[in-house]
Amino acid sequence: MAVEMRKTVVDVVGHVPWGTHFCLFYETKADLLEIATSYFQAISNF
């Protein structure tokens, strides 16, 4: 049975099976803001 792959907005992750979860750890508030900004920019272009 073929697994349905879904596109993510994270280029380095690529396509993943439906239901896959991943997380990102950060050390500082600046790291969090950089990650969140990049993510929201990516999904706004999705």
Image: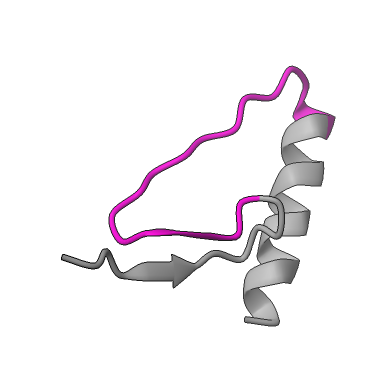
> Which residue sits at x=59%, y=32%?
24
Q: Farthest residue in the bottom direction?
A: 45
Q: In which quadrant will I find the C terminus?
A: bottom right
Q: Is residue 14 left or right of residue 11?
A: left
> In this view of the protein, which residue sits in the foreground, 4 or 35?
4
Which secondary structure is most common in the magenta stretch? loop
What colour scheme does the image use?
one colour
Residue 31 at x, y = what percent? 80, 32
Q: Is residue 10 left or right of residue 7?
A: right
How many numbered discs?
A: 0
Residue 26 at x, y = what percent? 69, 24
> Which residue sits at x=70%, y=82%?
45
Residue 41 at x, y = what percent? 74, 69
Q: Is residue 41 magenta?
A: no
Figure quadrant of residue 6? bottom left
Q: Is residue 28 magenta?
A: yes
Q: Is residue 28 left or right of residue 9?
A: right
Q: In which quadrant will I find the N terminus?
A: bottom left
> Which residue sits at x=61%, y=51%?
13
Residue 14 position (above or below residue 42):
above
Residue 11 at x, y = what percent? 71, 60
> Which residue sits at x=67%, y=64%?
40
Residue 19 position (above or below residue 29):
below
Q: Is residue 25 left or right of residue 28?
A: left
Q: Farthest residue in the left direction?
A: 1
> In this view of the protein, which residue sits in the foreground, 41 or 9?
9
Q: Farthest residue in the top direction?
A: 27
> In this view of the protein, which residue sits in the foreground, 33 or 22?
22
Magenta residue span? 13-30
